[in-house]
Image (cartoon, rainbow, N blue to C red):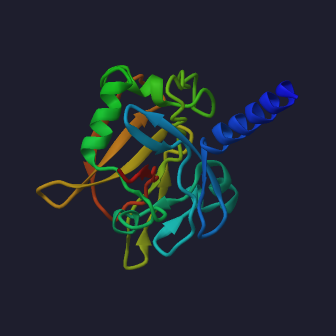
Amino acid sequence: MRFALFFALLLAALSFMACGQSFTDPRDGQAYKIVQIGNVTWFAQNLNYETDGSTCPEGDSRNCEKYGRLYTWEVAQNVCPEGWLLPDSLDFAKLVEQAGGPSQAGDALKATDGWFKKGNGSDAFGFKAIPAGYRGAVYEGEGGAYDGIGGYAYFWSATETLDGLAYYLFLDFSSKAAGLNAFGKGDFRSVRCIKKP
């Protein structure tokens, strides 16, 4: 009798732990793996919520399933589900430090497959960064070229620069490094959400 009760409690605990490693977006029912790094809970997948101001990598809907969607900076500000938000540049700076510092964090954060020319990472923290590339800004119906799929990952932050650009975390297939760069807000880039404190 005691063994049966212990076994039932163990199964319940294991089920709870498994459920605690994912989050289901109530807006569209998509489930995302999540990971705790330091004291922050991160999506371990790129957001794939369809909305105006978003697109699939390379303009191909099949790529959304693998890479998530790309968003303009303005849309990225409010695209995370309730209870989650877009990380700011400080959140990304802390993540880079926890993952070994700017010269090594790329390796620790990149997924173990999917990157060009042996550019895969160790995924030491379960962040599973994948190279969705980006889309350039669209002005008056012109531009908007896609680039970088398979080679580069760009994750928007909520932080603006003094000259009106926006910061993003950048990872490269040819380097173990990771760093914050800034670019125009009209570009379409990936989003990782963090749990609100």
Q: Quadrant of the N terminus?
A: top right
Q: How many dots with numbers?
A: 0
Residue sticking out furthest to the front: 1
Residue 180 appears in the picture as rendered:
yes
Locate residue 85: give its quadrant. Answer: bottom left
140 vs 160, nearest the viewer: 160
List x then y, in percent, for residue 131: 53, 41
Task: Tell me: 154 left or right of 131.
Answer: left
Residue 174 appears in the picture as rendered:
no
The residue drawn where x is 65% and y is 48% is 66
Q: Is residue 144 above or below residue 15?
A: below
List x then y, in percent, for residue 18: 67, 39
Q: Is residue 86 above or below residue 176?
A: below
Locate residue 162: give its quadrant. Answer: bottom left
Q: Is residue 190 above or below residue 55?
A: above
The residue drawn where x is 38% and y is 54% is 196
List x then y, in percent, for residue 87: 34, 50
List x then y, in percent, for residue 38: 38, 31
Task: Tell me: 11 left or right of 174.
Answer: right
Residue sticking out furthest to the left: 162
Task: Tell me: 96 left or right of 20.
Answer: left
